[in-house]
Amino acid sequence: MKEGPDIARLAALIGDPARANMLSALMGGRALTASELAAEAGVTLPTASSHLAKLCEGGLASPRRQGRHKYFSLASDEVARVLEGLMGLAAGHGHLRSRPGPRDPALRKARVCYNHLAGDLGTRMFDSLMARGLIGRGGDDLALTPAGRAFVADFGIDLSALDAGKTRLCRECLDWSERRSHLAGSLGRAILGRIEDLGWARRDRQTRIVAFTPDGETRFLERFCPAPD
Amino acid sequence: MKEGPDIARLAALIGDPARANMLSALMGGRALTASELAAEAGVTLPTASSHLAKLCEGGLASPRRQGRHKYFSLASDEVARVLEGLMGLAAGHGHLRSRPGPRDPALRKARVCYNHLAGDLGTRMFDSLMARGLIGRGGDDLALTPAGRAFVADFGIDLSALDAGKTRLCRECLDWSERRSHLAGSLGRAILGRIEDLGWARRDRQTRIVAFTPDGETRFLERFCPAPD
DNA sequence: TTCATGGTTCGATGGTAGTCGAAGCATGAG
DNA sequence: CTCATGCTTCGACTACCATCGAACCATGAA
């Protein structure tokens, strides 16, 4: 009865509609101000402020002052992963908040999951990296193989900077639309960043959609999901 | 603002202390009656009944009548996985419900995660199966290799019966204490069942602890986690 | 049939927490 | 300095929902 961690606190924190909306918005990956989050949640500033304090207190979000603005973002990749899991369950049981509109296919194709690529393209990339032996399951967790390190460096990512960070290099995250894993961790973040820098795609400001240019998508597929034959 | 699935409903469902206690109890894997769950949650029968109706309605639990008893269990492996994820977050943020008591080490060593083995032994088994190439990541998901099929059959598990089922054979589930994957899916279930049948271990009735006999643990390690050298 | 047990439904109660307006602080701009 | 903006705090209101006792229903036993 009272063994294990306290789920109820956490779930209740996520369980309020206003807070859930804020967290969903933060799944977009960019830090948002209190006012923006208030609008996002459909609530006035005072209530939003109260909610945000609770989210930070509860370890789900973290604040950052900048000038006279206060920016909020998700506290960690793990938070994003749990939220993605919840979305999967909710979607599976047919509890979509909005009818699947025109944005839905785009969301399923490629979207940002906190700070890394998710959706069809994200899972395909993960599978291909696995199949080609560029990442693999080491003793304890997901790891970049030597071949993988070369591949990533060749893509223009500075691995030494990533290695220094304290977040894990490779993590897997369960995709709510595909029901399969995609790549998270600092490497996942870096890859998405590089994709944007190269102009292959850009994040939509309002939604979680990652919009690839036709050319960008071709190049992405060539590099990350080549035909296995 | 209103894209994606409705997290709030689900999280609120889990967020009530009484319901969370019930779900935690059901993580033990065995089906429990309404009365038992009421006791588990520290609440009277009428309230428990109301909660259970909501859990079923929300797709988290599923009922089964048997005689004049009504048994409840978790609705799916996915539910268990999400709960495990929540526990990980809660534990990570230091929100343990009870101070880590004497049962805690035992829980971390080996426990049941809905219907399969979790904890230190569970993750070690998973890693070893991976390292030996008995399971591997196919195109889409985790799969049993030919060598793996032979290995599992040799352990005394009837694969044809499992293949017929509609739940996936291999799934991975993130372990809240180890922060790594362990094996879920119908195979994970079958392996734990076989371990009990062989008398290597038995589940504690009250907690989620899986208690191995000294001899059983030795045999388990020999078969599932042999030294890599 | 009658009794007992397990579960549900109902109505009333109470506490908790989300909500907002208004006032209070900061910080930055002019 | 003075004003404006962004956020927080306060107090009061409200609504929801968890909770329980009591009555009710169904199943199984005697």
Image (cartoon, coloured by chain):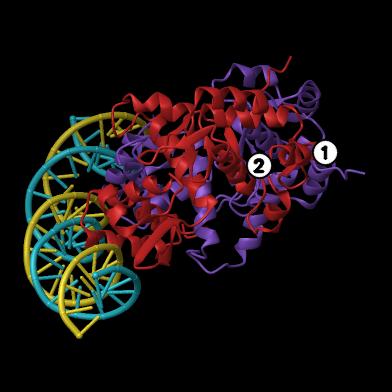
Chain colours: A purple, B red, C yellow, D cyan
Which residue: 77% across, 43% down? Answer: B138
x, y percentage for residue A126? 72, 40
Q: Under tag 2, what secondary structure? A: strand
Q: Quadrant of the C terminus of chain B?
A: top right
Figure check: B209 above or below A37: above
Which residue: 65% across, 23% down? Answer: B222
- Describe residue B132's horizontal placement relative to residue B206 as left or right: right
Q: Residue furthest top?
A: B229
Q: Nearer the viewer, residue C19 or A78?
A: A78
Q: Residue furthest right?
A: A229
x, y percentage for residue A85? 52, 48
Identify the residue under disc 1. Answer: A223
Identify the residue under disc 2. Answer: A182
Figure check: B226 above or below A32: above
N-terminal of the two: label 1 or label 2? 2
Image mark 1: chain: A
x, y percentage for residue A188? 65, 34
